[in-house]
Amino acid sequence: MTIPESNIDPNGYDPRGNRLLKEDGSMRDMNDMLNTDGTVKVVIEGDSGDQAEVGTNNALKTETYSGLVGPMKLDASTRAVCFVNYTHCEIHSGSHYLYRSYDSILKAGVKELLIVTPNTTKWSHMTVGFEMLGSTVVAELFEGVSTSDDGTPALVQNRNRNSNNTNTVLIYEDPTVTGGAVAGNLIQSGIFGAGRGSAGGSARDNEEVVLQQNTKYLIRFTEQNLTATSVNYVMDWYEHTDKSIAPHTESSSSSSSSSGSSSSSSSSSP
């Protein structure tokens, strides 16, 4: 089958994204698509045009923006590609954190948690979950509060227990709030408790919020004057330097450092 040249763009691609022209401008033919053993060649290109390669173990190698290369594994039984999702990758890279705890709330009482983000482009991608053990509680999330005392620092855990990375987002219990917990700063709210289920637990894509840098967030639980209760709560997040602001920063620094003497570095972002 011949593709009319009018359907090939200046870069040599047909309307379906297949590259039909060689580097010298000549048309590819079937022989260009076969290996010497007759198997079909497959080329995978990323947004930057970089191509994946096959290693000596016949595993597909992929190259990330940071210059790290590794094989893409296949399941031995089904030959299906094995992978983990992005948030799971953040656990492996040591950039994923967790704070889980509980507390009692008196009748008509209030429990507050403070989230403080740093003034950097390493943004927090966070989900918050909680459940009430009886009674009814209104839960609210305020953005941009001010405090005279941030409260008691919470012990945040890195979800990769082999990593020495530490969180830049800080969590506090029982802050002294002096302003900002007003309707205009309320970004989420709901009523939970007896017969009303709990918050969190659905697909992360439906729950995750990218927090604003250099900002204080307040989570407030208010018992609705029924009876004392208890609340379990969890904050789960990964910290990732936004590439739309600083694209390929790690890649550039990695390339320049490797051009001279051998060196190694680590980063809490993938």
Image (spheres, rainbow, N blue to C red):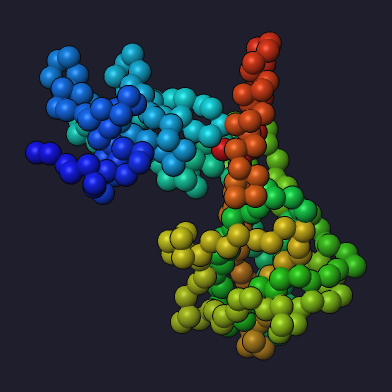
Q: Position of 8 compared to 232: left or right?
A: left
Q: Residue furthest right?
A: 148
Considering depth in this image, is 1 or 267 the residue closer to the camera? 1
* Residue at x 53%, y 27% (from the top left corner): 67
Give the x, y percent position of residue 184.
71, 82
- Residue found farthest to the front: 6
Q: Quadrant of residue 266?
A: top right
Work out which quarter of the rendered image holds the C terminus and state it: top right
In the picture shown, does residue 55 fall above or below 197?
Answer: above
Nearer the observer, 64 or 78: 64
* Quarter of the image where the N terminus is located: top left
Give the residue furthest to the left.
Answer: 1
Q: Is residue 143 visible?
A: yes
* Residue extending furthest toward the bottom: 225
- Residue 95 in the image: x percent, y percent? 61, 42
Place of residue 43 in the rendered image (x, y in percent of width and height, measured from the top left): 30, 31
Query: What residue sits 48% from the left and 80% below the top?
Result: 196
Q: Position of residue 129 (x, y in %)?
A: 55, 64
